[in-house]
Amino acid sequence: MSIFSLQDVVDTLTAEGIDAGKHRINHAISRGYVSRPKLVGGNRVYTAKHLGELRKYLVNAPSPGRQPAAV
């Protein structure tokens, strides 16, 4: 199981061409759009599951006039 820091997540998603800022990721977590990562020593630890959820959310994040994500 791979684990990632917040900066690792931002770097990975940005390299894939997704607009992934720390504030967007933290907003998605605080609003419940993606599952909350475990805290280890006061730091959030992200897994591949979180990366998948963030990809899906950030590609089609809620905004006025957006189309629902295709299922």
Image: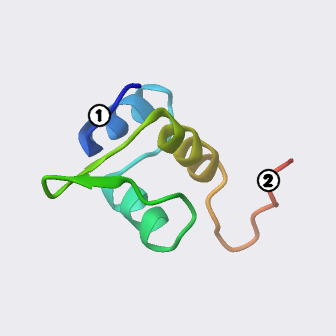
Instruction: From the image, tell me which residue sits under label 1.
Output: 8
Residue shown at 48% from the left, 33% from the top? 48
Where 25 sits versus 18, above or below? below
Colour mode of the rendering: rainbow
Of marks 2 and 1, the one in the foreground = 1
Q: Position of residue 43 (x, y in %)?
A: 19, 53
Quadrant of the rendered structure where residue 6 is?
Answer: top left
Q: Nearer the viewer, residue 2 or 34?
A: 2
Instruction: Tell whether label 1 touches label 2 (CB within 8 Å).
Output: no
Residue shown at 62% from the left, 46% from the top? 59
SS type, badge 2: loop
Q: Work out which residue is located at the far right of the displayed protein and give it.
A: 71
Q: Nearer the viewer, residue 24 or 9?
A: 9
Instruction: From the image, tell me which residue sits under label 2.
Output: 69
| 3D distance between C-alphas at marks 2 and 1 | 26 Å
Q: Nearer the viewer, residue 54 or 40?
A: 40
Quadrant placement of the N terminus: top left
Amino acid type, label 2: Ala
Q: Nearer the viewer, residue 58 or 36?
A: 36
- Checking the image for residue 18, the label placed there is none
Which one is earlier in the sequence, the residue at label 2 or at label 1? 1
Residue shown at 56% from the left, 50% from the top? 58
SS type, badge 1: helix
Rate crowding at label 1 as few (under 14), some (14 to 19) or many (20 or more) other CA atoms within 10 Å: few
Amino acid type, label 1: Asp
Q: Position of residue 23 (x, y in %)?
A: 34, 61
Residue shown at 26% from the left, 56% from the top? 39
Q: Position of residue 38 (x, y in %)?
A: 34, 54
Rate crowding at label 2 as few (under 14), some (14 to 19) or many (20 or more) other CA atoms within 10 Å: few
Left or right of 9 on screen, residue 29 = right
Where 45 sits versus 61, above or below? above
Q: Work out which residue is located at the far left of the displayed protein and give it.
A: 41
